[in-house]
Amino acid sequence: MKCKKCGKEAVVKLRHYNLALCEDHFYEFIEGRVEKAIKKFKMFSKKDRILIAVSGGKDSMTLWYILKKLGYNVDGLFIKLGSEKEVMPALEKVEKLAKELQAKLMIEDATQYLFGLSTFEAAKILRRPTCSFCGMVKRYLMNKVAYEKGYDVLVTGHNLDDEASVLLGNIFHWQGEYIIRSYPVLEKTHEKLVKKAKPLVLNYESDIKLYAKMRGIDFLESACPFALGATSKVYKKLLDTLEKDQPGIKLQFYTNFLKLKEDLFKVEETRKELVLNSCEICGYPTTGKICSFCRSVENLKSRLEKLKVNPQQKA
Ligand SMILES: [Zn+2]
Ligand SMILES: [Zn+2]
């Protein structure tokens, strides 16, 4: 098996692209796909100040590595979702990579907003599904930090498998609005909403993992401190099954959707359709009057009071 680019002995065979590559050309190929997504979807330029949310998992860690390598101005943000002990395995890996990349790393403590509780404990008291509550808290705080520190773009490590499976789930439930609005870039549609981008959308999850291992990026297998992972893995599994039978279908499914969308709608318009208000408590964007973050904090406070726990003591 020879590398398609240089003819040297290939070390990887990517079935979904029907492509065999040597080590160097594999790196070049993966990094090239990140650059392609950045340009194609007009995510950001070398002049922008970029903030990346890093969890310690393979996707965000690899993306940080690649963006730095490509010469982008990108700082890291780690959201502390639980106690020191709970987050330490992830934080150690993130700090190690920050040092290697000589990059700036910020840490935002979510527990300070949750009366000292972890997102796991707070979700339990609020009787909310942990992953969706945790996701909401992360999105809120990532945007808050990016806004307060004046960043131009906030990037996350969502990969092709993530995006394709979310799209498939939305199609199964015919979530029209989500389907129409789904795009690798979310523009700034509110004063306190920072532009968001997902530069890994053209890369398969398995390729990212392979890249991270070959490059020696030390990541955590499960970056979730509560070891739950995503709850809706069923669409991912479904796509994996299809992929085995029809290599490349995941990529086609997602990119053909984006093409169709651009043909059917004027993307610019549909992306700005959603009217955002300012939360009456914190001023950050919300579709209602009070954002779900503030609503959760209020609920948590009253439940804790009912439980006769003094929030001040816990904090
Ligand atoms: Zn080669
Ligand atoms: Zn709010």
Image (cartoon, grey):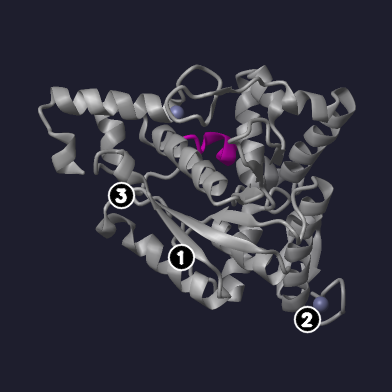
Residue 144 lies left or right of residue 16; in this view the side is left
Q: Name the residue at 78% across, 66% down.
A: 29
Label 3 C-beta lies within 8 Å of the nearest ligand 2 atom: no
Pick out the residue farthest to the right. 263
- Residue 85 image point, x, y percent: 25, 59
Which segment is the magenta one? 232-238
Gap in angstroms between the C-alphas marked 1 and 2: 34 Å
- Residue 128 image point, x, y percent: 34, 27
Gap in angstroms between the C-alphas marked 3 and 2: 46 Å
Q: Quadrant of residue 272?
A: top right
Q: Name the residue at 85% across, 35% down.
A: 259
Q: Quadrant of residue 45?
A: bottom right
Which badge, 3 or 2, comes first in the chain's sequence? Answer: 2
The amino acid on which the numbered mark 1 sits, given as a three-letter code, is: Val
Which residue is label 1 attached to? 94
Which badge, 1 or 2, comes first in the chain's sequence? Answer: 2
User: Where 23 falls versus 151 (above or below)?
Assistant: below
> Residue 9: which disc?
2
How packed mark 2 is, by other alpha carbons closer than 10 Å (few <14, some 14-19, many 20 or more), is some
- CB atoms of marks 1 and 2 within 8 Å: no
Residue 101 lies left or right of residue 45; in this view the side is left
Which residue is label 3 attached to? 82
Is residue 237 part of the magenta span, yes or no?
Answer: yes
- Looking at this view, is 162 or 305 the one in front? 305
Is residue 92 part of the magenta span, yes or no?
Answer: no
Task: Please identify the quadrant where the C terminus is shown.
Answer: top left
Task: Please identify the quadrant where the N terminus is shown.
Answer: bottom right
- How many numbered discs? 3
User: Where 236 falls versus 283 (above or below)?
Assistant: below
The amino acid on which the numbered mark 3 sits, given as a three-letter code, is: Gly
Label 2 C-beta lies within 8 Å of the nearest ligand 1 atom: no
